[in-house]
Image: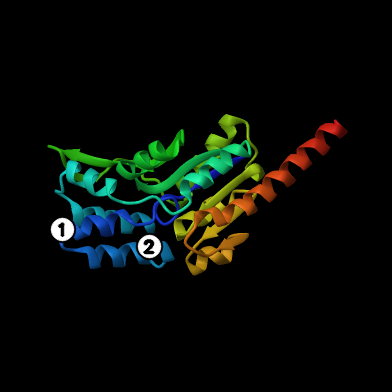
Amino acid sequence: MIVAFDLEGTLIDAELFPALGEKLGNKAQLDDITNRAMKGEIDFTSSLHQRVGLIKGLSISEAQRIAGSLSLSHGAEETVSGVKRLGGVPIIVTGGFDILAHRAAYLLGIEYVCCNKFKLQDGCITGIHPPIITGKGKAEKLLGLASWLGVKPDQCVAVGDGANDIEMMRATGLSIAYNGRPKVRETAKKSVEGGDLRYILPIIEEFASTTHEQDYLVNQIL
C-alpha cells in the first residue's frame, strides 16, 4: 500500500505563497490566486506561473526561512507513523515546492517526494524548473512510483484538498478529501473535515485490511 499525501493544506497547515506574500506585501493577491487554483477555477499551471511571477526576486534563503516557519498539520506525525505501522509507504506528491516539501519529508520521515523546484539566479527566485508537476503530473508520479515498488494502483491511497489532487485521486483505490474544496469532495471516495489529520487513519486502516484480505484470497486461489 502506498499513501500519497498532498502537502499544503494536508501535511502542512498553511499555503506557502500567501506566507511569502506576507513578506512582500502582496499576500491578498497571492491568497486569491492560490484559492482559485485549489477550487479549480483557474488552470493550475497558469496560476503557478502567476504566483511565481509575484515573488520573483525574493532570495531563496528568505523563502526557506519562511517555509521553515510553517507548521505541520495537527496529527501529521502520528498519521504518517500509522501508515508505516500498517505496512504502507507514505509519500509526498505535491504541486508545491521543494523548500517546503523536503522539510516536511525530513520532519515526518518520508522517503519519497515529488515536487516542483524554483529556478534561481544569484540566489534569488526567477521561475520554475521544468517539467512542472500539475494535477496530471501528480497522478503520473504516483503511478510511476507504484509500478517501481510493485504496488497496484488499486492498492494506493490519495489524500488531498485541492483541485490538482483530483486526477491522482481518480487513479487510486482509495481517495480521501481532507478539508477538501467542493470539487474534491465530489470526487473523493471519502471526505473528512476537521483540524486533526489523524481522522483519516481509521479509513486507511479499513482499506488496508480489505486489501490484505483480497491479496490473501487471490494467493489461496493461485
- Is 139 located above or below residue 34 in the figure? above
Residue 59's image quarter?
A: top left
Please give the name of the residue rendered at 41% of the width and 57% of the height, measured from the top-left corner: 9
Crowd band around label 2 with a 10 angstrom C-alpha radius: few (<14), some (14–19), many (20+): many
* Disc number placed over residue 66 in the picture, else none: none
Q: Which corner quadrant holds the C terminus? A: top right
In the displayed structure, does residue 68 sit left or right of residue 158? left
Q: Position of residue 213 (x, y in %)?
A: 78, 41
Q: Distance between the residues labelled 1 and 2?
A: 21 Å
In the displayed structure, does residue 131 sit left or right of residue 109? left
Q: What residue type is labelled 2?
A: Ala
Q: Is mark 2 on a helix, strand or loop?
A: helix
Q: Where is residue 3 in the image (x, y as percent from the top left)?
A: 56, 44
Of 74 and 149, nearer the camera is: 74
Please give the name of the residue rendered at 50% of the width and 54% of the height, measured from the top-left corner: 197
Q: What element carries label 1?
A: helix
Of 205 and 46, nearer the camera is: 205
Please give the name of the residue rendered at 20% of the width and 39% of the height, measured from the top-left corner: 120
Residue indicated by mark 1: 24
Of 156 and 65, nearer the camera is: 65
Report whether residue 88 is seen: no
* Disc number placed over residue 37 in the picture, else none: 2
